[in-house]
Image (cartoon, rainbow, N blue to C red):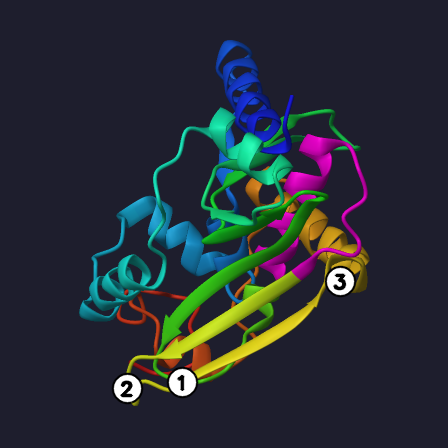
């Protein structure tokens, strides 16, 4: 069985297992976006969030940026075997077991692009659109978790797989890119993931933002009773 087919079938199997055993699913994007303020994520879950113009534009940029040829996954593995490189967006995940409680959650996500070659996964790319040209630590966390997901699905080390974060500035159209290897950030990613999942598993109270600058741009600043700034 080829690597792409393996990931597709593995994810299907994990999803079925989670559904049958009533294991909750947490999206990787929700984990990374709660890094700076877990209380904001709590408010999002409670009240929902409105789609902003920046979000709409971001979706349009993603659609233009990543255009994939629709290929049957089994045929894709044949192309890889012939020496062709292919990029896909596909669902990845794994079952997390909390060491303290034994509770299980399924971590699930869909990287913007996974580049495959004959010898395996070559690069994982995540695109971010925002009003500045900065790579955030939450971006690094997100792409790092994606790497760990794929690593666990394939049961191999992906320490040498390249991770890339691209940031598209929606104000001036500038673009920056930062690359590193999964092995360089894996330990720190697991440490942050363990801590954040304590919040998602309700093992502790949600943390609030450490900087008032985060509160100033928050959609919930008018109703939040824990903000660091006046209304």
Residue 55 is inside the magenta segment? no
| Magenta-tinted stretch | 141-162
On the image, numbered disc 2 is attached to which residue? Answer: 171
The answer to whether the residue labelled 1 contacts the one labelled 3, judged by CB atoms less than 8 Å apart, is no
Mark sitting on residue 221: none
Q: Which secondary structure lies at badge 1?
A: loop
Quadrant containing the N terminus in the rendered view:
top right
Q: Earlier in the sequence, mark 2 or mark 1?
A: 1
Q: CA distance from mark 2 to mark 1?
A: 8 Å
On the image, numbered disc 1 is attached to which residue? Answer: 132
On the image, numbered disc 3 is attached to which residue? Answer: 185
Q: Residue at x 64, y 26 (%)?
A: 104
Q: CA distance from mark 2 to mark 3?
A: 30 Å
Question: Which sits in the foreground, 120 or 188?
Answer: 120
Question: Which sits in the foreground, 24 or 54?
Answer: 54
Residue 228, position as x, y percentages in the image: 45, 78
């Amino acid at each position: 069985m080829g690597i792409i087919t393996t990931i597709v079938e593995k994810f299907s199997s994990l999803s079925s297992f989670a559904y049958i055993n009533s294991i909750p699913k947490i999206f990787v994007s929700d984990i990374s976006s709660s890094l700076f303020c877990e209380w904001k994520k709590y408010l999002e879950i409670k009240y929902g969030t409105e789609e902003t113009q920046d979000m709409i534009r971001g979706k349009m940029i993603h659609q233009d940026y990543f255009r994939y040829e629709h290929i049957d996954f089994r045929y894709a593995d044949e192309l890889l075997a012939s020496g062709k490189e292919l990029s896909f967006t596909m669902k990845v995940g794994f079952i997390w077991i909390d060491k303290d409680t034994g509770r299980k959650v399924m971590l699930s996500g869909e990287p913007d692009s996974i580049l495959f070659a004959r010898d395996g996964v070559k690069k994982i790319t995540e695109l971010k659109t925002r009003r500045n040209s900065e790579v955030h630590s939450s971006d690094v966390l997100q792409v790092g978790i994606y790497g760990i997901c794929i690593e666990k699905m394939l049961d191999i080390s992906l320490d040498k797989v390249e991770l890339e974060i691209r940031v598209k500035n929606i104000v001036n159209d500038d673009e920056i890119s930062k690359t590193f290897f999964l092995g360089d950030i894996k330990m720190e990613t697991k440490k942050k993931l363990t801590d954040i999942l304590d919040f998602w598993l309700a093992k502790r109270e949600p943390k609030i933002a450490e900087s008032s600058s985060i509160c100033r741009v928050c959609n919930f600043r008018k109703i939040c009773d824990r903000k660091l700034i006046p209304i």
